[in-house]
Image: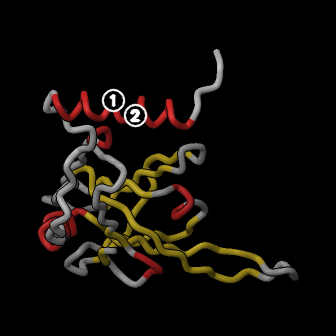
């Protein structure tokens, strides 16, 4: 193939454009230049009100040793969620691992001692049991339906400050 001159290129482009326009085709899509209205932001108030009764604050005490092998009590905190109306709660294993005492505080500030009934350090999951009845278990969703950009809400015991939504 040989090179084409600028004159041949311009003639070819003119021919293509005239054929396209004469057949009613628009080579360029129409662009709406009107500004889009701002998107309406969702409210998370309903999500928090519906979910918060199923979220618990977990506080722990662990016996630790300093450099001189002196023991002291270290406090920890985490979050969990109720999975059964009879007091079963899921949390992270690292929250309760090695704890000498575990307390669970419900959204209404009722506090219960808790026992570990199962844990797995590999998956970092633990199941606790408190002696309470008629609790509201959390409803789980389907993570397969989430998309990048969807709104999410984290509800938990951030920094041991009580149950909050972020």
> Which residue is under mark 1?
16
Seen as rendered, the residue at the extreme right is: 68
Q: Is residue 63 visible?
A: yes
Residue 24 % position (x, y): 13, 32
Name the one closer to the observer, 128 or 144: 144
Q: Looking at the image, do the residues carrying marks 2 and 1 touch, with CB atoms under 8 Å apart?
A: yes
Q: Describe residue 99's horizontal placement relative to residue 141 as left or right.
A: right
Image quadrant assignment for residue 100: bottom right
Residue at image point 15% right, 74% down: 45
Secondary structure found at label 2: helix
- Residue located 42% across and 76% down the image: 158
Q: Which mark is residue 83?
A: none
Callout 1: few (<14), some (14-19), or many (20+) C-alpha neighbours within 10 Å?
few
Q: Can you say which quadrant of the picture contains the N terminus? A: top right
Q: Position of residue 95 (x, y in %)?
A: 52, 64
At x 55%, y 37%, the residue is 6
Asked if residue 124 lies left or right of residue 41, the reply is right
Res. 42 in view: no
5 versus 52 height, above or below: above
Q: Considering the numbered disc 1 on the image, is that residue within a helix, a strand or a loop? A: helix
Could you say where residue 7 lies in the image, as x and y percent from the top left? 51, 35
User: How far, Cα to Cα, is label 2 from label 1?
Assistant: 5 Å
Point out residue 56 in the picture as x, y percentages from the top left corner.
Answer: 31, 68
Which residue does the image show at 53% across and 76% down from the upper left? 76
* Residue 13 image label: 2
């Amino acid at each position: 193939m040989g090179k084409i001159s600028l004159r041949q290129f311009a003639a070819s482009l003119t021919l293509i454009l005239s054929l396209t326009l004469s057949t009613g085709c628009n080579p360029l899509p129409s662009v709406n230049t009107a500004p889009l209205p701002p998107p309406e932001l969702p409210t998370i108030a309903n999500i928090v009100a519906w979910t918060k009764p199923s979220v618990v604050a977990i506080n722990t005490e662990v016996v630790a040793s300093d450099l001189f092998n002196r023991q002291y009590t270290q406090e920890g905190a985490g979050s969990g969620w109720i999975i059964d109306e009879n007091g079963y709660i899921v949390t992270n294993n690292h929250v309760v691992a090695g704890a000498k005492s575990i307390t669970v505080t419900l959204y209404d500030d009722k506090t219960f001692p808790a026992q570990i009934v199962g844990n797995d350090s590999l998956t970092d999951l633990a199941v606790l049991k408190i002696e309470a009845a008629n609790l509201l278990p959390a409803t789980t969703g389907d993570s397969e339906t989430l998309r990048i950009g969807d709104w999410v809400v984290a509800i938990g015991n951030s920094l041991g400050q009580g149950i909050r939504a972020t």
